[in-house]
Image (tube, helix red, strand yellow):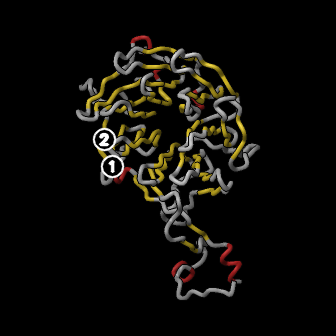
Amino acid sequence: MLLVQAALADVRDFRFQRITGEHGLAQNTVSALLQDRDGYIWVATQGGLHRYDGQSYRLFAQASDDPASLPDNFVTALAEGEPGTLWVGTNSAYVAELNLASGRFRRLLLADLNHPGEPGKHVLALYYQPGHGLWVATEGGIDLLDPATGKRSSVLRQPTPASTHNSFGFASDPAGTLWATLPSGLYRIDPVTLATKRMSVLPGIADILRDHRGRMWVSADGLYRLDPASGQMQRSGPPARTGSDADWPQRLAEDDHGRLWMATSRSGLLRYDPDTGATVNVHANSAQVDTLPEDEVSVLLVDRSGLLWVGTWTAGVVVTDPHGARFTFISDPDAAHVQRYTNSVRSLYQSAD
């Protein structure tokens, strides 16, 4: 009987600390996360850009009477540039450069983008590549922006349906070649000649990551290992889910043990260890406190201390130790039971095995 009860218990292996509007976020839909050289955590939401110093948030927001303020409160992407600068992508005003010392923005919405219905001013991903410039993925394709002059080079034109906002990512391989994920596939881009070549048309392609060993990973209808030299991809990671309930991995991050974390839109988090093949699925659980607040995860970040930051669609930001909670928490989730009795532990016993 005790074994049956234990099997029906809720087990919490990860403890998530919630950092929501009560602690300074202006809005709880998180679209991008970044840690800068000084250690500050930047959180992009639909209500502005936030800088977290470990205790509180500073909000950067649009001011209609200040041309040096954030041009659009709906922030969609972030990238750190040269020391002292942060690049900010927006929903309707293209890109702005934030001077970290002054807190002032330089707006770079070019004249050819500044008209209604132009998909090229809706930014979905940013990537700064020293020596080449700022790569900008928009609903209209891919641009390369010269940070000094603001000159925009159109690299790839490909209007994208609005329903595929999460299918954009950049990473450079060990040789310096740029790789980009778009809803239409995986692209290889020469950062010097700007020549592009589509290398794959995997369904559900979403993100690309270069890990600390230099290996390239792509999320699509599963997790794939990319060989940059040949462009070939090999399926790896957890088995792909198929059918009407398929919920494929989207955003990717690597923790300090080399394990890959994958965000999904309905199934919470996946953790995959490439060395052992071990997979862990982390779900929201309303019956317990300090769990993942919802299964709709939008973006991930592992900071330099090793903590995993998780941005969600409606519940703000949560932070956890990617190795798991120091103490596993076990409880009786049945609301029909008298909780003061079923979760009141009076003794412990270790069996022979």
Which amino acid, by three-letter code, is at mark 2? Leu
Image marks 1 and 2: residues in contact by CB distance under 8 Å:
yes
Q: Quadrant of the C terminus?
A: bottom right
Task: Report which residue position mark 1 lands on.
Answer: 24
Q: CA distance from mark 1 to mark 2?
A: 8 Å
Furthest residue to the right? 243
Instruction: Give 106 or 186, whichever is nearer the viewer.
Output: 186
Instruction: Give 340 or 206, whichever is nearer the viewer.
Output: 206
Q: Secondary structure at mark 1?
A: loop
Q: Is residue 133 left or right of residue 155?
A: left
Q: Quadrant of the N terminus?
A: bottom right
Q: Is residue 267 left or right of residue 344?
A: right
Task: Report which residue position mark 2 lands on.
Answer: 59
Instruction: Give 296 or 168, whichever is nearer the viewer.
Output: 168
x and y percentages locating residue 191 in the rendered image: 52, 21
Which amino acid, by three-letter code, is at mark 1? Gly
x and y percentages locating residue 31 in the rendered image: 47, 39
* Residue 169 disc label: none
Q: What's the residue at 50%, 30% (across, down)?
A: 124
Q: What's the residue at 73%, 46% (across, down)?
A: 241
Instruction: Give 84 or 25, whichever is nearer the viewer.
Output: 84
Q: What's the residue at 46%, 21% (across, down)?
A: 121
How many other residues sit within 10 Å of disc 2, few (<14), some (14-19) or many (≥20)? some
How many other residues sit within 10 Å of disc 1, few (<14), some (14-19) or many (≥20)? some
